Amino acid sequence: MNLSILDELQPIAEELQRHMSSHVLEHLAKEKGFVQRKSKYQAQELVALCVWLRQQVFL
């Protein structure tokens, strides 16, 4: 992604962070099957890496 797209997405990411607590993220991750068991890493940490820290995840 180029810098202008990332700059446009930043306000959206900030609003998501403001409205979605860690409890909501954990519940959503379990509901959707992303999290099936407890581990030392939580769904909110993955979201932080992908969205708020602007890291790209390649699968």
Image: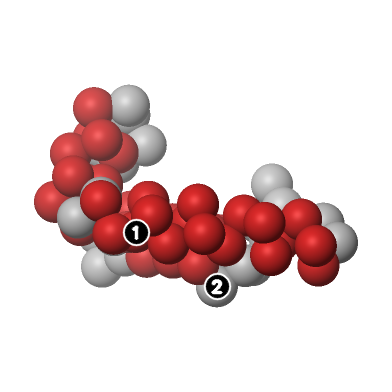
Residue drawn at the location 19% of the way across and 55% of the way down: 21
Res 54 seen here: yes
Residue in front for this viewpoint, 46 or 19: 19
Residue drawn at the location 25% of the way across and 51% of the way down: 19
Write down the quadrant of residue 18 in the picture: bottom left
Labels 2 and 1: the sequence-earlier one: 1
In x, y percent, where is residue 3?
A: 81, 67
In x, y percent, where is residue 45?
A: 37, 65
- 44 vs 52, left or right, is left
Res 46 seen here: no
Residue drawn at the location 80% of the way across and 62% of the way down: 4
Residue 20 lies, with reference to residue 3, above or below; the image says above
Q: Disc 1 marks which amino acid?
A: Gln
Tell me the residue that label 2 is attached to.
53
Element under label 2?
loop
In x, y percent, where is residue 15?
A: 38, 55
Identify the residue at the far top of this view.
Answer: 32
Element under label 1?
helix
**Distance between mark 2 and mark 1 Cα atoms:** 12 Å
Rate crowding at label 1 as few (under 14), some (14 to 19) or many (20 or more) other CA atoms within 10 Å: some
Q: Disc 2 marks which amino acid?
A: Leu
Q: Which quadrant does the N terminus fall into? A: bottom right
Residue drawn at the location 50% of the way across and 67% of the way down: 52
The numbered dot on residue 17 is 1
